[in-house]
């Protein structure tokens, strides 16, 4: 996946949840090859944890489609809850700024609102909103 200015990091997903997120991105019209990167949380872990069922980490390049798909995924069929995500911004000079965001997953609008507020607080450039 090509490095983008802003990435959303979703940790602790099962493989099934990552597949469901990918399906949601495709339904929203997104291209998985350029939008979603999934890797095992076992990367770089030595022998003591071998054989355990690892979760996965999803890296999503921010776009209007991605934000909509993530908001639908997080709010779909889930009771009111809060979930921790990370926003990562890579600046042109190579510096990376990362903040952890707690989002309200009760609705698509609540997820988007929390993500936009957090990104604005660290002056991350956001995609154009319709």
Image (cartoon, rainbow, N blue to C red):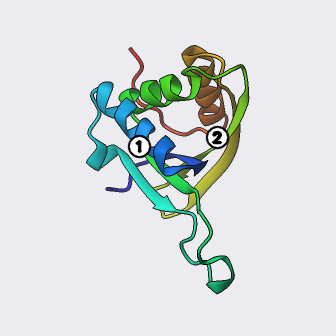
The residue lying furthest to the bottom in this view is 47
Residue in the picture at 64% in, 40% down: 122
Q: Quadrant of residue 96?
A: bottom right
Residue in the picture at 47% in, 33% down: 126
Q: Quadrant of residue 107?
A: top right
Asked if the residue at tag 1 contacts the one at tag 2, i.e. Cβ–Cβ closer than 8 Å, the answer is no
Query: Marks 2 and 1, how far apart in space?
Result: 30 Å
x and y percent of residue 39 in the render? Answer: 46, 61
Give the mark toward the camera: 2 or 1.
Answer: 1
Residue in the picture at 67% in, 34% down: 121
Residue 46 shown left or right of residue 128 in the figure = right
The residue beneath circle 2 is: 122
Rendered view: 17 above or below 15: above
x and y percent of residue 22 in the render? Answer: 38, 39
Mark number displayed over residue 11:
none
The residue beneath circle 1 is: 19
x and y percent of residue 64 in the render? Answer: 39, 27
């Amino acid at each position: 996946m090509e490095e983008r200015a802003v990435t959303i990091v979703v940790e602790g997903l099962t493989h099934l949840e990552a597949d469901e997120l990918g399906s949601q991105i495709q339904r929203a019209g997104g291209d998985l090859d350029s939008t979603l990167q999934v890797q095992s949380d076992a990367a770089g872990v030595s022998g003591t944890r071998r054989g355990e069922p690892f979760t996965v980490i999803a890296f999503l390049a921010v776009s209007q489609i991605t934000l909509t798909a993530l908001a639908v995924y997080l709010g779909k069929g889930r009771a009111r809850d809060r979930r921790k995500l990370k926003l990562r911004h890579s600046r042109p000079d190579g510096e990376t700024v990362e903040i952890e965001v707690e989002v309200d997953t009760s609705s698509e609008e609540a997820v988007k609102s929390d993500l936009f507020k957090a990104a604005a607080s660290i002056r991350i450039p956001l995609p154009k909103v319709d």
